[in-house]
Image (spheres, helix red, strand yellow):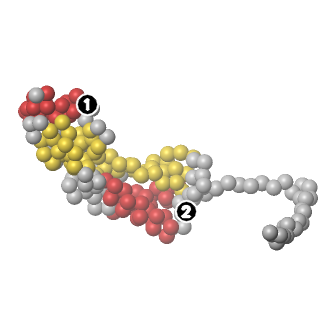
Amino acid sequence: IKNVISGIIILFERKVRVGDIVAVQGMTGYVTQVDLRASTLRGFDGLEALVPNSSLLENQVINWTYSSAHVRREIRVGIAYGSPVHGAADIISGCADDHGQVLRDPKPEVFFEDFGDNALLLVLVFWVELGPNLMGRRVDSDLRYAMEKRLGTAGISIAFPQRDVHLDVSQPLPVRVTREPVARPDPG
C-alpha cells in the first residue's frame, strides 16, 4: 500500500519523470517507466532496476535533469614543470571550444589549480546537456584525446611522477666487485 500511495504522489507531483537521469540507492541511470508500485531505472551499464516508489520518496534522490539537463564537468590535466602554462591553458580551452557537444554558455574555462608534487595542475570546467544520445563520459574522453594530441604537438608534456636523486660526490663512492655463488650439483 505504501508503494502505491508513493506512486500516486510521484505521478501527481512529477518530481521524477520518464527520461530523467536520477541517482538513487547507489544506482544512476534513466527513468524508463513510472508505475503505481515501482519505477524502472535503466543504469548506464544497461542493467534495469525496479525501484519501489516509496524509496523515491523516503531516500535522497538526485535528479540530474529535474529543472535542467545542463551538467558541469571537470577534467584535470597535469603538465610538466617548466611548460608554458598560459599556452597549455589556451590549447585545453581550444579543445573544449572545438567540441560540438560542449556548451558555449557558460563558456568553458581553464583554471591553474595548483602546484602539484609532480605537475602544474590545470582544470578544464565546462558544461554539457545530458540526453539519451549524450554521455558526459564520452565528451570527457573525446576532450582528453584532443588535449593529449594538441599538447604533444606543441611540445608540452603531460606530467608523470618523478623523483630526483642527489648523489654526494664530495667524497669518492665506494665500489665493490663481488662474485655470484656458483651453484653446486645436488649429490643425491
Residue found 29% across the figure and 54% down from its top: 45
From this view, report whether residue 186 is shown above or below residue 105: below
Q: Amino acid at mark 2?
A: Ser
User: Is residue 92 shown left or right of residue 9?
Assistant: right
From this view, report whether residue 17 is shown above or below residue 102: above
Measured from the top left, where is residue 43 in percent x and y? 26, 49
Secondary structure category for the residue under label 2: loop
Mark 1 surroundings: few (<14), some (14-19) or many (≥20) residues within 10 A: few
Residue 59's quadrant in the figure? top left
Q: Which residue is mark 1?
A: 59
Residue 175's quadrant in the figure? bottom right
Q: Which residue is mark 2?
A: 157
**Nearest the eye: 162 or 11:** 11
User: Is residue 154 shown left or right of residue 145?
Assistant: right
Q: Amino acid at mark 1?
A: Asn
| Quadrant, the N terminus | top left
Secondary structure category for the residue under label 1: loop
Measured from the top left, where is residue 65 in percent x and y? 21, 43
Mark 2 surroundings: few (<14), some (14-19) or many (≥20) residues within 10 A: some
From this view, report whether residue 4 is shown above or below residue 71: above
For the residues labelled 1 and 2, the Cα–Cα distance comes to 46 Å
Measured from the top left, where is residue 110 in percent x and y? 43, 51
Q: Which mark is residue 112?
A: none
**Nearest the eye: 117 or 25:** 25
User: Is residue 108 shown left or right of residue 183?
Assistant: left
